[in-house]
Image (tube, rainbow, N blue to C red):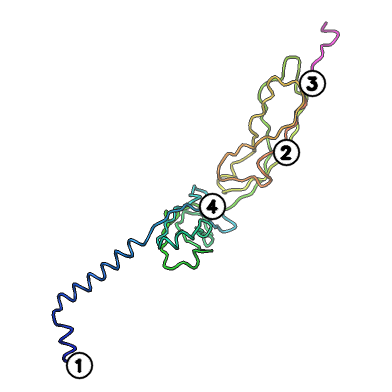
Amino acid sequence: MKIREIGEAIINNWPAKILSIAAAVLLFYFYKLNTTEVHFMTVPLEVTLNRNFVAASIYPTEVRVSLRGSSETLSLIHERDIAAYVDFSARNIRGEFREPVRIRRSGNALYTDPLEIRVRPSDIRLNIEEKFVKNVPILPIVRGLPAENYEIISSTISSNNITVSGPLSVVERIASVRTEDINIENRRESFTTSVKLERVSEFITFLEGDEVQFFGRIERIFASPEAE
């Protein structure tokens, strides 16, 4: 066939041919749409900070992830194959910053293609401050009174001090840490109990743990001969 004849064959009845191509594209698109699914999962959010800084505002601990792909491939992907993280480690001054949430694939998700991944929220805004560490005394808070004719003779705790770590603006205002209430109402015997430390801010941590042991010595009071 000559070149001229080929050209005429191509342009001959061209509107119908264009419509046929468009119809084929639409059929392919609808086929892909019908064989594509969207799965949702919630995964933990890993936040990385500069070692000299800590978070000074609330941020989400989980994010919502949507996966779009074929039903066969999506059925093989588990939550452990998708990790979400945000990196503030380059921020080394106090302030509020925004960083994108990124996705790290592993397992079956690493080799699945095509796979479209979206995450909400797509970025995190965070206040960061210098990390400050301080040692402060622990104050046991005892409530109530022993039973009649009994009294608490002495009390001790397993540690008199605790190391507090957190944002500078928070930790520098902490002069001491109280225990949660220790109830001795109507007690007749000495006792030992674990008691939580009162957290004055959600941004602080206790480096030695958030519990101490409290020992209370309770004895009966005997009336003196003179009192009789």
Q: Position of residue 108 (x, y in %)?
A: 51, 64
When asked about the image quadrant of residue 181, the answer is: top right
Residue neighbourhood size for the residue with mark 2, other residues' Cα within 10 Å, grouped as few (<14), some (14–19), many (≥20):
few
Residue neighbourhood size for the residue with mark 3, other residues' Cα within 10 Å, grouped as few (<14), some (14–19), many (≥20):
some
Q: Amino acid at mark 4?
A: Glu
Q: Nearer the viewer, mark 3 or mark 2?
A: 3
Q: Secondary structure at mark 3?
A: strand
Outermost right residue: 225
Q: Secondary structure at mark 4?
A: strand
Residue 15 appears in the figure? yes
Residue, disc 3: 219
**Real-space Cα distance between discs 3 and 2?**
24 Å
Q: Amino acid at mark 2?
A: Asn
**Real-space Cα distance between discs 2 and 1?**
100 Å
Give the mark nearest the N terminus, 1 or 4.
1
Residue, disc 4: 129
Residue, disc 1: 1
Give the mark nearest the N terminus, 3 or 1.
1
Outermost front residue: 1
Q: Position of residue 111 (x, y in %)?
A: 49, 68
The answer to whether the residues at label 3 and label 2 have Cβ atoms under 8 Å apart is: no
When asked about the image quadrant of residue 179, the answer is: top right
Pick the quarter of the image with the N terminus.
bottom left
Give the mark nearest the N terminus, 4 or 2.
4
